[in-house]
Amino acid sequence: MSQIKRLEQKRQEALDKANRIKKQIEKQLNGQKFVLGGMLMAIAEHEPDRIPQILADIDRYVTRKADISRLESFKSEIGNNIPKDALLSSSEQNKASSDDDMTQFFKTELE
């Protein structure tokens, strides 16, 4: 009977250790996301010509409703800082990107 208790205790210790490691990993990932978000905000502030691409990336990669809501004020704030000439080049880039996406799509479908 005591051997069963020791095994149960070892099992619980292993589970506790796994949970601690999992929390450490989550904390590290959240820290990385926080730093990357700050970096992206600094890029938008210091390099306004990159704002159209940032906005396009937000629209493309942020898909959860809660996350979209969180970013609305940021999007409208940086949207007011887009240089006029960046709007023109952005539409040209988006057209080229769209063409590349379609080319890649058809290559994949044909293979």
Image (cartoon, rainbow, N blue to C red):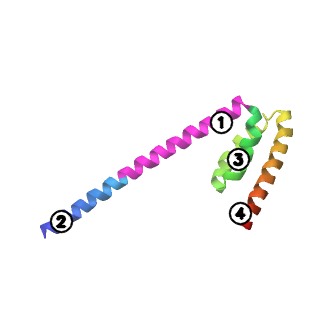
Residue tagged 1: 41
Location of residue 109 by image quarter:
bottom right
Which residue lies at the image location 32% right of the left edge and 59% below the top edge? 15
**Residue found farthest to the left:** 2
User: Label 3 sits on what residue type?
Assistant: Asp
**Residue found farthest to the front:** 111
Task: Give yes or no for contact between labels 3 and 2 (Cβ–Cβ under 8 Å).
Answer: no
Q: Nearer the viewer, mark 1 or mark 3?
A: 3
Location of residue 8 by image quarter:
bottom left
User: Label 4 sits on what residue type?
Assistant: Thr
CA gap, disc 1 and disc 3:
13 Å
Location of residue 12 by image quarter:
bottom left
Residue tagged 2: 5
Q: Nearer the viewer, mark 4 or mark 2?
A: 4
Mark 2 falls on what kind of element? helix
CA gap, disc 4 and disc 3:
23 Å
Q: Position of residue 89 (x, y in %)?
A: 84, 39
Q: Main secondary structure of the magenta part?
A: helix
Task: Give yes or no for contact between labels 4 and 3 (Cβ–Cβ under 8 Å).
Answer: no
Q: Position of residue 2 (x, y in %)?
A: 13, 67
CA gap, disc 4 and disc 2:
57 Å
User: Label 1 sits on what residue type?
Assistant: Met
Task: Give yes or no for contact between labels 4 and 2 (Cβ–Cβ under 8 Å).
Answer: no
Task: Give yes or no for contact between labels 4 and 1 (Cβ–Cβ under 8 Å).
Answer: no
User: Label 2 sits on what residue type?
Assistant: Lys
Residue tagged 4: 108
Please give the label number shown on residue 57. 3
